[in-house]
Image (spheres, helix red, strand yellow):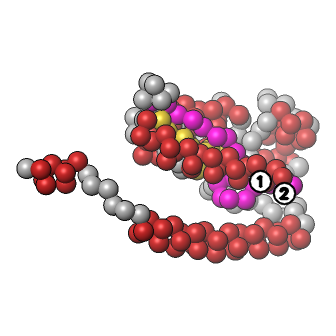
Amino acid sequence: MIRNRRGLIVEVTENDVLSAGGNPVTQTVKLALKGLALNMAAELRPHGVAAVAVTPGFLRSETMLERFGVTEETWREGGKKDRNFLESESPLFVGRAVVALAGDPAILEHSGQLFSSWELGREYRFTDTDGRRPDWGASKIDFSKHPEQLLQLLRTGSEIQLRWLSELRRKTKHFLTQLPQTETKAVRDTRAG
Protein backbone atom coordinates (compact mmCIF):
# COMPACT_ATOMS: atom_id res chain seq x y z
CA MET A 1 0.00 0.00 0.00
CA ILE A 2 2.80 2.40 0.86
CA ARG A 3 4.57 1.60 -2.42
CA ASN A 4 1.32 2.21 -4.35
CA ARG A 5 0.58 5.36 -2.29
CA ARG A 6 -3.00 4.30 -1.67
CA GLY A 7 -4.93 1.86 0.43
CA LEU A 8 -7.26 1.37 3.35
CA ILE A 9 -6.75 -0.59 6.56
CA VAL A 10 -9.94 -1.37 8.46
CA GLU A 11 -10.11 -2.56 12.06
CA VAL A 12 -13.49 -4.10 12.86
CA THR A 13 -14.39 -3.64 16.51
CA GLU A 14 -17.41 -3.25 18.77
CA ASN A 15 -19.33 -0.13 19.71
CA ASP A 16 -18.94 3.42 18.43
CA VAL A 17 -17.78 4.71 21.81
CA LEU A 18 -14.71 3.71 23.81
CA SER A 19 -16.35 0.94 25.79
CA ALA A 20 -17.35 -2.46 24.46
CA GLY A 21 -18.94 -5.61 25.82
CA GLY A 22 -17.22 -8.53 27.42
CA ASN A 23 -14.69 -9.07 30.14
CA PRO A 24 -11.85 -6.58 30.80
CA VAL A 25 -9.42 -8.36 28.46
CA THR A 26 -11.94 -8.42 25.61
CA GLN A 27 -12.78 -4.76 26.22
CA THR A 28 -9.08 -3.86 26.15
CA VAL A 29 -8.59 -5.60 22.80
CA LYS A 30 -11.62 -3.85 21.30
CA LEU A 31 -10.39 -0.48 22.57
CA ALA A 32 -6.92 -1.25 21.18
CA LEU A 33 -8.38 -1.80 17.71
CA LYS A 34 -9.92 1.68 17.83
CA GLY A 35 -6.61 3.17 18.98
CA LEU A 36 -4.65 1.21 16.40
CA ALA A 37 -6.61 2.82 13.57
CA LEU A 38 -6.05 6.23 15.14
CA ASN A 39 -2.29 5.69 15.49
CA MET A 40 -1.81 4.13 12.05
CA ALA A 41 -3.68 7.02 10.43
CA ALA A 42 -1.05 9.58 11.41
CA GLU A 43 1.86 7.37 10.37
CA LEU A 44 0.36 6.28 7.05
CA ARG A 45 -1.19 9.59 5.90
CA PRO A 46 2.01 10.84 4.18
CA HIS A 47 1.98 7.60 2.17
CA GLY A 48 -1.63 7.99 0.99
CA VAL A 49 -2.86 5.08 3.11
CA ALA A 50 -5.92 5.44 5.36
CA ALA A 51 -6.77 3.50 8.52
CA VAL A 52 -10.17 3.44 10.18
CA ALA A 53 -12.11 1.44 12.74
CA VAL A 54 -15.63 0.25 11.94
CA THR A 55 -18.23 -1.24 14.22
CA PRO A 56 -21.33 -3.11 13.17
CA GLY A 57 -24.61 -2.66 15.00
CA PHE A 58 -26.42 -5.64 16.49
CA LEU A 59 -24.68 -8.20 14.31
CA ARG A 60 -26.64 -11.21 13.13
CA SER A 61 -23.61 -13.46 13.20
CA GLU A 62 -23.82 -17.24 13.10
CA THR A 63 -23.35 -17.27 16.88
CA MET A 64 -26.23 -14.83 17.43
CA LEU A 65 -28.51 -16.73 15.06
CA GLU A 66 -27.73 -19.89 17.00
CA ARG A 67 -28.29 -18.13 20.35
CA PHE A 68 -31.71 -16.96 19.19
CA GLY A 69 -32.53 -20.34 17.66
CA VAL A 70 -33.17 -18.88 14.21
CA THR A 71 -31.60 -18.93 10.75
CA GLU A 72 -30.80 -16.09 8.38
CA GLU A 73 -34.12 -16.80 6.67
CA THR A 74 -36.15 -16.78 9.93
CA TRP A 75 -34.12 -14.22 11.89
CA ARG A 76 -37.11 -11.94 12.55
CA GLU A 77 -38.47 -14.64 14.87
CA GLY A 78 -35.62 -13.67 17.21
CA GLY A 79 -37.46 -10.40 17.83
CA LYS A 80 -39.92 -12.34 19.98
CA LYS A 81 -37.12 -12.99 22.47
CA ASP A 82 -35.49 -9.57 22.18
CA ARG A 83 -37.06 -6.79 20.13
CA ASN A 84 -33.61 -5.21 19.68
CA PHE A 85 -32.85 -8.10 17.32
CA LEU A 86 -35.32 -6.62 14.83
CA GLU A 87 -32.78 -3.85 14.19
CA SER A 88 -29.95 -6.35 13.68
CA GLU A 89 -27.81 -6.48 10.57
CA SER A 90 -26.19 -9.28 8.60
CA PRO A 91 -22.39 -9.45 8.39
CA LEU A 92 -22.77 -8.30 4.77
CA PHE A 93 -23.94 -4.87 5.96
CA VAL A 94 -20.67 -4.01 7.70
CA GLY A 95 -18.89 -5.50 4.68
CA ARG A 96 -20.73 -3.05 2.45
CA ALA A 97 -19.66 -0.27 4.81
CA VAL A 98 -16.03 -1.23 4.23
CA VAL A 99 -16.58 -1.34 0.46
CA ALA A 100 -18.16 2.13 0.57
CA LEU A 101 -15.20 3.53 2.49
CA ALA A 102 -12.72 1.86 0.15
CA GLY A 103 -14.45 3.46 -2.82
CA ASP A 104 -14.46 6.95 -1.35
CA PRO A 105 -11.88 9.10 -3.16
CA ALA A 106 -11.68 11.33 -0.05
CA ILE A 107 -10.93 8.44 2.34
CA LEU A 108 -7.79 10.13 3.69
CA GLU A 109 -10.02 12.84 5.16
CA HIS A 110 -11.71 10.11 7.23
CA SER A 111 -8.52 8.34 8.26
CA GLY A 112 -8.15 7.67 11.97
CA GLN A 113 -11.87 7.83 12.65
CA LEU A 114 -14.24 5.35 14.26
CA PHE A 115 -17.30 4.67 12.12
CA SER A 116 -20.44 2.65 12.60
CA SER A 117 -22.08 0.61 9.87
CA TRP A 118 -25.37 2.46 10.39
CA GLU A 119 -23.80 5.92 9.97
CA LEU A 120 -22.01 4.76 6.84
CA GLY A 121 -25.26 3.24 5.57
CA ARG A 122 -26.91 6.64 5.92
CA GLU A 123 -24.02 8.47 4.25
CA TYR A 124 -23.33 6.07 1.38
CA ARG A 125 -26.92 4.79 0.98
CA PHE A 126 -26.19 1.04 0.88
CA THR A 127 -28.58 -1.59 2.23
CA ASP A 128 -28.43 -4.98 3.87
CA THR A 129 -29.17 -8.27 2.07
CA ASP A 130 -32.91 -7.84 2.57
CA GLY A 131 -33.00 -4.26 1.24
CA ARG A 132 -33.31 -2.72 4.73
CA ARG A 133 -30.93 -0.12 6.11
CA PRO A 134 -30.54 -1.14 9.77
CA ASP A 135 -29.83 1.89 11.94
CA TRP A 136 -28.72 0.86 15.41
CA GLY A 137 -27.89 4.50 16.20
CA ALA A 138 -31.47 5.65 15.59
CA SER A 139 -33.00 2.65 17.32
CA LYS A 140 -34.58 3.06 20.73
CA ILE A 141 -32.69 0.29 22.50
CA ASP A 142 -34.78 -1.82 24.83
CA PHE A 143 -32.77 -2.24 28.04
CA SER A 144 -35.69 -3.79 29.97
CA LYS A 145 -34.11 -7.25 30.07
CA HIS A 146 -30.79 -6.00 31.40
CA PRO A 147 -30.11 -6.18 35.14
CA GLU A 148 -29.98 -2.84 36.97
CA GLN A 149 -26.41 -3.55 38.05
CA LEU A 150 -25.30 -3.69 34.40
CA LEU A 151 -27.25 -0.54 33.54
CA GLN A 152 -25.59 1.31 36.42
CA LEU A 153 -22.19 0.11 35.24
CA LEU A 154 -22.96 1.43 31.75
CA ARG A 155 -24.13 4.79 33.16
CA THR A 156 -21.07 5.18 35.36
CA GLY A 157 -18.71 4.10 32.60
CA SER A 158 -20.27 6.55 30.13
CA GLU A 159 -20.02 9.44 32.59
CA ILE A 160 -16.37 8.62 33.30
CA GLN A 161 -15.70 8.29 29.57
CA LEU A 162 -17.11 11.76 28.89
CA ARG A 163 -14.90 13.31 31.58
CA TRP A 164 -11.89 11.35 30.31
CA LEU A 165 -12.45 12.44 26.70
CA SER A 166 -12.95 16.05 27.72
CA GLU A 167 -9.70 16.04 29.66
CA LEU A 168 -7.90 14.22 26.86
CA ARG A 169 -9.11 16.85 24.38
CA ARG A 170 -7.83 19.65 26.62
CA LYS A 171 -4.44 17.99 27.02
CA THR A 172 -4.11 17.19 23.33
CA LYS A 173 -4.93 20.77 22.34
CA HIS A 174 -2.27 21.99 24.78
CA PHE A 175 0.28 19.53 23.39
CA LEU A 176 -0.49 20.69 19.85
CA THR A 177 0.26 24.30 20.80
CA GLN A 178 3.71 23.24 22.01
CA LEU A 179 4.70 21.56 18.76
CA PRO A 180 6.79 23.71 16.43
CA GLN A 181 4.77 24.93 13.49
CA THR A 182 5.93 23.70 10.10
CA GLU A 183 6.06 26.05 7.20
CA THR A 184 3.82 25.26 4.31
CA LYS A 185 5.22 25.28 0.77
CA ALA A 186 3.30 28.52 0.11
CA VAL A 187 5.03 30.26 3.04
CA ARG A 188 8.47 29.01 1.90
CA ASP A 189 7.77 30.21 -1.65
CA THR A 190 6.73 33.63 -0.32
CA ARG A 191 9.95 33.98 1.68
CA ALA A 192 12.07 32.83 -1.25
CA GLY A 193 10.38 35.15 -3.78
Labels 2 & 1 near each other (Cβ < 8 A): yes
Amino acid at the residue labelled 2: Pro
> As drawn, is 100 to the left or to the right of 162?
left
In the image, residue 22 lies in the stretch drawn in magenta: yes
Does dot 1 land on a helix, a strand or a loop? helix
Residue 76 sits in which quadrant? Answer: top right
> How many other residues sit within 10 Å of disc 2, few (<14), some (14-19) or many (≥20)?
few
Residue at 45% in and 42% down: 45
Instruction: Assign the magenta stretch its main secondary structure.
Output: loop
Query: Does any portion of residue 112 appear in the rendered image?
Result: yes
The residue at which mark 2 appears reads as 24
Residue 17 at what x, y percent from top left? 66, 58
Residue 189, position as x, y percentages in the image: 15, 48
Q: Compared with residue 85, is residue 156 higher up or lower down, i.e. above or below?
A: below
Residue 28 as seen in the image, left or right of residue 135: right
Residue stretch rendered in magenta on the structure? 6-24
* Cα–Cα gap, marks 2 and 1: 6 Å
Crowdedness near tag 1: few (<14), some (14–19) or many (≥20) residues, C-alpha within 10 Å: some
Q: Nearer the viewer, residue 75 or 51?
A: 51
Q: Is residue 135 visible?
A: no
Spot occupied by residue 164 in the image (x, y as percentages of width and height): 64, 71
**Residue in view at x 84 percent, y 40 percent:** 64
Residue under the image location 42 percent in, 35 percent down: 48
State the image coordinates of residue 88 (x, y, percent, origin top left).
73, 44
SS at mark 2?
Answer: helix
Identify the residue under disc 1.
Answer: 28
Q: Is residue 124 left or right of residue 60?
A: left
